[in-house]
Image: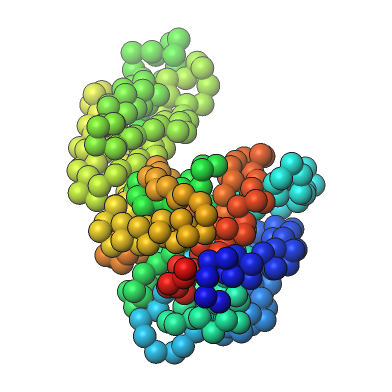
Amino acid sequence: MQTYRELTRSVAQRRPEMLEMIAELVQVESPTEDRMAVNRCVSLLEKWIQTAGGKSRRNAQSKAGDLLIGRFGPARGAPLMLLGHLDTVWPLGTLKKMPFRLRGGRAWGPGVLDMKAGVVMALIALRVLAEANRLAQPVLYLLNSDEETGSEYSRAVTESLARKCAAVFVLEPAQGLAGAYKTARKGVGNYRLQVQGVAAHSGVDFTQGHSAVLELGRQVERASAFTDLARGITVNAGVIGGGTRSNVVAAEAWAEFDVRIAKAADGPRIDRRFQSLRAVDRQCRLEVTGGLNRPPMERTSGTVTLFRRAATMAAGLGFQLQEAATGGGSDGNFTSALGIPTLDGMGAVGEGAHADRESILLDALVPRTALLAAMIGGLSLE
């Protein structure tokens, strides 16, 4: 394999196999909350890693699906990490109303974009490189099972392994139909505000009550004002609840907030602001819990260097690669925050993640897999 054309040809020869693997993987449903379902996906990938010539190690988890670590290439040297996940947001039975199908130049199905196609693309890229004897450095292929719910159980393993790696390539979908690689992501936080009021009959003893619902409304407005679009900070009260009946002054109410930040330095600032909330009605009590779940993936010099290399390789493969920032988080946030050059969005191109229109562009599979292979192999091609 000496030219970009030869690399593309090698990947294209495996396109039918790639589509078969994507179809099989999508049809093994794997909602995060169902440990056994996710583990069926883990078992399938364990077999595929070994078939591709890699070594696999499975880390059993009691509260989530197992973690799978594949190893490829030579034993010596600082590894490259390929980072992905096997869990999806889709409950068991989704395939009945969203079956896997090929139509209109796309593959459709739950989890096909986020991110089962990217998982398969990485395996095909590794196989192409191994067959050409072009794996010059060790590769760690880490597949987590709880990314969609915050990576509570996998984060420590991801960070531990990443500290030994020279760079991290994240197999999440590319940004938009233009297929931009992601060089920055926002950090993600979740806060819960609980309000304790004083119950009373709203007709007989209205003045004796202190409404938790009314107090919550005031506090939602205060917290929402923490949004600072110029700094990339957003605060969204996405879920609220409280009260028991319309004729009862509410004794309890609560709200859950989604917080996004662009800079790590804003994390402590936002936390202080949430903790500083005080009740307007002094007969009500406030309790704030939660915090930042994922640090932001900032656009570092190391990530920019990786992107520029990818853009050069993409040009050699015949297409223009763009970069983008996104408000969503991934496991790449963790590795980037450790100071490890991290490039994200290196998986499939498509749209509709987490929606019933979830799909990938079939025409992008070969060139994007070829680019991934070139980046993994650090290839200098003509």
Q: Quadrant of residue 326?
A: top left
Q: Closest to the observer: 145 or 325? A: 325
Q: Is residue 286 left or right of residue 18?
A: left
x, y percent for residue 305: 31, 61
x, y percent for residue 332: 40, 59
Q: Looking at the picture, does residue 270 appear above or below residue 204?
A: below
| Total numbered labels placed on residues in the image | 0
x, y percent for residue 363: 65, 51
Res 124 visible: no
Q: Is residue 291 left or right of residue 81?
A: left
Q: Closest to the observer: 266 or 5? A: 5
- Hey, which residue is sitting farthest front in the picture? 382
**Residue at x-position 52% and y-position 70%:** 3
x, y percent for residue 119: 58, 64
- Hey, which residue is sitting farthest right in the picture? 96
Q: Closest to the observer: 123 or 93? A: 123
Q: Is residue 352 left or right of residue 283?
A: right
Q: Closest to the observer: 315 or 174? A: 315
- Hey, which residue is sitting farthest top in the picture? 203
**Residue at x-position 70% and y-position 63%:** 15
How has the structure been colored for display? rainbow
Quadrant where the N terminus sits is bottom right
**Residue at x-position 25% and y-position 32%:** 230
Q: Is residue 121 left or right of residue 332?
A: right
Q: Looking at the picture, does residue 301 appear above or below residue 90?
A: below
**Residue at x-position 25% and y-position 23%:** 281
Res 315 visible: yes
